[in-house]
Amino acid sequence: PEIEFAYPDGSTELVTANIGQNVMKVAVNNNVRGIVGECGGEMSCATCHVVVMQGHQSRFEEASEDELDVLSSLDTLEPHSRLGCQLRVPAEDTIRFTVPDA
Ligand code: FES
């Protein structure tokens, strides 16, 4: 599937990913701006914060308590915020995320 990352300035990046791949890793491998993945997916850095596009939330497993804890510490928290390192690319067509302002 393809994944579109939208930046705060309105520009977008379209990348190709494999089903089941870690969304943070896909972003880092494709040099998506604003996604760092500093902790490597340990849920301690939140530098993989993405906002799932409206209507796409149900395509991912629900956030764990630990993920919600980390998210709740973010100034840039939005209703559909997720940690990219906790998301797997689903088996459907294009997924869209917004990358929040750092
Ligand atoms: Fe650190 Fe996701 S990579 S919390």
Image (cartoon, rainbow, N blue to C red):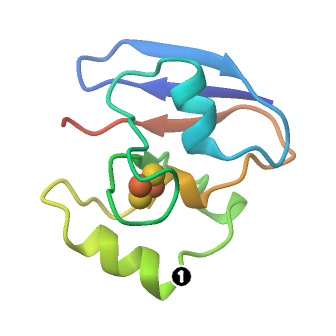
Quadrant into which the N terminus falls: top right
Q: Which residue is rendered at x = 19% and y = 62% of the image?
A: 74
**Viewer-closest of 78 and 22:** 22
The residue beneath circle 1 is: 64
- Residue 80 lies in quadrant: bottom left
**Name of the residue lying farthest toward the bottom:** 65
Residue shown at the point (67%, 47%) measured from the top left: 22
- Note whether 34 is above or below 86 in the view shown: above
Residue 31 seen in the current view: yes
- The foreground one among 67 and 53 is 67
Q: 29 left or right of 37?
A: right
**Quarter of image, res 73:** bottom left
- Point out the residue furthest to the left here: 75
Q: Nearer the viewer, residue 87 or 56?
A: 87
Determine the residue positioned at 68% across, 62% down.
Answer: 60
Q: Where is residue 64 shown, x and y percent of the image?
A: 53, 82
In the figure, is residue 74 to the left or right of 43? Answer: left
